[in-house]
Each structure stands twice: as C-alpha cells, then as structure tokens.
Image (tube, rainbow, N blue to C red):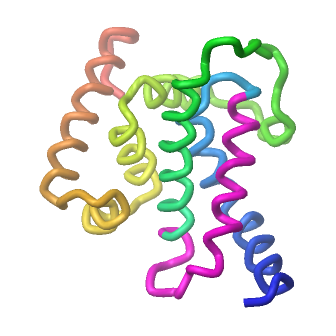
Amino acid sequence: MGQTEQQRVFDGWLRNHQGLFFKVVRAYAFTPQDQEDLFQEIAAQVWRSIPGFRGDAAATTWIYRVALNAAIAWTQKERRHRDGKQSLDGVEPAFLQASPAADPRIEWLYEQIRQLNEIDRSLTLLLLDGFSYKEMAAMLGITENYVGVKINRIKSHLTGKSREETGNGI
C-alpha cells in the first residue's frame, strides 16, 4: 500500500470514526494534556496499523482494537512516568473544544468509566457502541462467557454507584 492510499484510508477513518477515538481518549486519559497525548498516540497507532488491515473485520472493529490496545499501553507507560510531570489542568485540548456541551449524565458515566480497570473500561466502551459479546471477546482475547460475567458485574457496579449518588438506578 502506498503512502497516498494509506493517507486516504486514515483520513476517512479519522473522519468517520472520530467519535470512537474521543470515547477511548475520555475513558483512559483524565487531564486535558493527557487526553491530547493519548489522542495523538491512538492516531499514530491507527496510522501504523493500516497496512496490516486486511478487511477480515469491519473497520470499526479494527480501529477499536488498535485504539484500546494503544490506550492500555499508554496508560501503563504513563503510570511509570507520572512523577515529575506538570499538570496542565484547565487547558482544554483542541479536539475537545469543538465538542458540544456535555450532558451531566454523560459526564458522570465517563467519570465512572475512568475509575474502572482497563479491561472493564474497554468492555464498557464496546458495550456502549453495540458490539456483541463474541466481537468483544475476539478484540480483547477473552472468552464470550467471561465477557458476559464482566459486563454483568460492571452493570451492577454502575447501578450501585448511581443509586448511592442519586437514589435511583442508572
């Protein structure tokens, strides 16, 4: 694949799946600077992955797999390098500035998702985007049964948190 074709595919994926990029970024990065860094990392990984895309899976599935793996690797790397970093809280990344005003319920949900472990975060994002248990299992390298067990636990956890804070379920 030539670089021009790779650029065309990348531009199309970025345009058509930008919401997917943002969901993963919001779930794995907490500060605006980290969100900007993670977005760049995911975009770079997606770019590098294009020559390996054979079309066996849908582009969305491929992009999710690459984005989640990049986010998990970035999170682990950031944990090791967190000391000595300056916080840029209050500086909003450019890619979030264009997003519409957020619904407080969505903000609450993302806050809860950020508190989950990496696998649970990934499963939650995939569930919210309507992937089947089979697709989730294939993307994350776990069994369908384990996906079901984890999702039931996540739902129970989130419902409990919602009841604690609001007196209602989700």
- Magenta stretch holds residue 14: no
Q: What residue is drawn where x is 86% and y is 84%?
A: 4
Residue at x 69%, y 30% (from the top left corner): 34
Q: Say which residue appears at 69% left-offset and 12% top-offset.
A: 84
Location of the C terminus (image quadrant): top left
State left or right for residue 57 relative to residue 74: left
User: Where in the figure is residue 59, as x and y percent of width and height?
Assistant: 56, 75
- Viewer-proximal residue, 8 or 78? 78
Residue at the location (78% across, 37% down)?
Answer: 96
Depicted 116 relative to depicted 9: above or below: above
At which x and y percent is residue 44? Answer: 71, 57
Q: Main secondary structure of the magenta part?
A: helix
Q: Quadrant of residue 91?
A: top right
Quarter of the image where the N terminus is located: bottom right
Rendering coords of residue 40 (x, y %)? 74, 47
Magenta residues, start to end? 34-61
